[in-house]
Image (tube, helix red, strand yellow):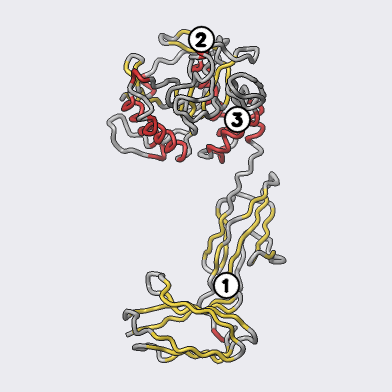
Amino acid sequence: MKKFKHDDLLFCPLGGSNEIGMAPEAKWMGCRDMASGVGQLSTYLECFEWFLAPTDLDDKNADPDKAPHVINNSWGCPTDEGCNTSNFATLETSVNNLRDAGVVVVVSAGNDGSKGCSSINTPAAIFAKSFTVGATNSSDAIASFSSRGPVTVDNSNKMKPEISAPGVGVRSCVPGGGYQSMDGTSMAGPHVAGLVALIISANPGLAGNVDKIEEIIKNSAVKLSSSSCGSSGVPNNVFGHGRIDALAAIEEAVKVCNLKPKVVQNGEMLEIEGVANAKSYKWYFEGDEIQGATSETYKPTKSGKYKVEVTDNNDCVAMSEEFEVVISGIDASQFLGDFKMYPNPHTSSFTISFVGRETSSISLQIYDMLGEQVYSISENVNGKFSKTIDTEKFSNGIYTLQIVDGNNKWHRKIVKQ
């Protein structure tokens, strides 16, 4: 396997009429998985693994933080390179791992369109999580060479490709510093990979969100219908969802709400993480809005579940997940009258008693030092409550008693010796 650095490459001079490429300022990395145009299962797997956690040029210091946002794959692995139905799953796992890690896996559909339908027949274009690309010409007709679905080589009959892009007469840089017009789905695939880079540039919050990026590209595409190859309308087994439209995709991308507020506790205050700025806040307790709680911090007054709704300056609205607050160190008399717990420390049992609210339902739990629950009861209380708890089977040590009365929680340390 060969990893490239920029000094290894001869770039074509740009300027004037030679403005080529979709995202010319994007950072680029490469992994060579073929020798003289021929690869094999092991080299394809090796490059997929490297993209997941790139190493330095000495194959050391693997770093998943350096994984690319998108990879372009203009290759197929036919049977004469060792790929067949017995090992498809191995290569597909690598594709799935990359995608699950936040990498868009763009794959050219192949140039076997002359063979008709089901000509998308080699990895990695056949896999469900590959973003497979067909080729169109300047008139938005499908290129005659562009491979089509459905995928039948693995008996899945899945629809492919997902999308199409220009792949006929595409001006590109060639070795030696010159330019040439070329045809192929290998010219269409890079258009889509470049579009992914443009989308992330327009809305950095989409980086790693493969589902949303692919959804934007498909939804914004110029819809091209076809009744060939066992499908009709859009999507279909010829164009997929249609031909990419970069401007429409960017316009859709900038509208995506990326707010991900998270409630955290800092001392006595609840604060918000994941929001750079916002114009309004609404705090909720146990699902109900807290009137007057409209700042970016909030001081909870009782135990329970809190969450916050944030609206940013672009009118994007997002709700955090619930954050449970336990008010510790409060006097039990705030919600329990005449509370007693004795003896403490104890040897084999202890008793708690208190006067609770009328027709109150309480729960009582005991947790060990690892946070594991070792005892639990729930009972209705109508005034006075008393309970002797047997701890004969408890190991010696420190435990936490928790009593929940409505929205209130109270904790007390217990010592078994």
Residue 303 tag number? 1
Quarter assignment of residue 335 = bottom right
Mark 2 element type: strand
Q: Position of residue 291 (x, y in %)?
A: 72, 66
Earlier residue among tags 3 and 2? 2
Q: Where 217 sits versus 358, above or below?
A: above
Mark 3 element type: helix
Tell me the distance, in whole angstroms, between the alpha carbons under discs 3 and 2: 24 Å
Q: Position of residue 290 (x, y in %)?
A: 69, 66
Residue that numbered label 3 is attached to: 217
- Number of marks in the image? 3
The answer to whether 399 appears left or right of 142 in the picture is left
Residue 182 tag number? 2
Tell me the distance, in whole angstroms, between the alpha carbons under discs 1 and 3: 45 Å
Specify the farthest residue to the right.
291
Earlier residue among tags 1 and 2? 2
Amino acid type at mark 2:
Met
Residue 343 tag number? none
Confirm or deny contact between disc 1 and disc 3 (CB under 8 A): no
Q: Position of residue 409 (x, y in %)?
A: 55, 76
Q: Is residue 334 visible?
A: no
